[in-house]
Image (tube, grey):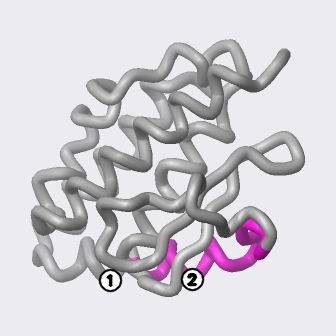
Amino acid sequence: MNLETKLNEYKSNIEELKSIESLEVYRWLMSLGEKLNDDPLSEEKRIEKNKVKKCQFDLFVDYENGKFKAWSKAMVAAGYAYVLIDIFNSLKLDQAKKITVDDFKKIKMDELLTMNRKTGFFEMIEMMIAKIKNVRN
């Protein structure tokens, strides 16, 4: 799997749902948020340094057991966290280390999110980029 393929997959889903009704995107994100809790970030890792501070609800992300994991009670935040984790975790480590914030602008999710959610979305990307750089191959 490569980054472009994964980004295009999410971009297509978003565009299809948006063409039906913008609320469908939120329903989809909430359903993904439920999936995030199938394998959440451990409680020990839900600490201040792993908290997405610009998110209005508690959202935590860290690299744990060889992959990214996250946790949030807020279903929309958990949904976009699921998308980000899925993208990062689907790539080989050397590919994931090359991801930039601009890569995520291609899926246009930021256009669908409220201002608070958008800032949390981009902060989470920046945190994941910083964390992946410290992971050894």
Q: Is residue 39 magenta?
A: yes
Q: Secondary structure at mark 2?
A: helix
Mark 1, mark 2: which one is toward the viewer? 2
Residue 66, quarter of the rendered image: top right
Circle 1/circle 2 CB separation < 8 Å: no
Please name the amino acid that badge 2 sits on.
Glu
Q: Nearer the viewer, residue 44 or 10?
A: 44
Q: Which residue is mark 2?
A: 34
Q: Position of residue 26 (x, y in %)?
A: 27, 77
Picture residue at 59% right of the left edge, 49% below the top:
86
Q: Is residue 14 magenta?
A: no
Picture residue at 52% right of the left edge, 14% below the top:
98
In the rendered image, the quadrant that contains the C terminus is top right
Extent of the magenta region: 30-43
Q: Which residue is mark 1?
A: 27
Q: Position of residue 89 (x, y in %)?
A: 67, 40
Using a 10 Å C-alpha cutoff, classify the residue at mark 2 as few (fewer than 14 neighbours), some (14 to 19) or many (20 or more).
some
Left or right, 94 with reference to 136:
left
* Image mark for residue 8: none
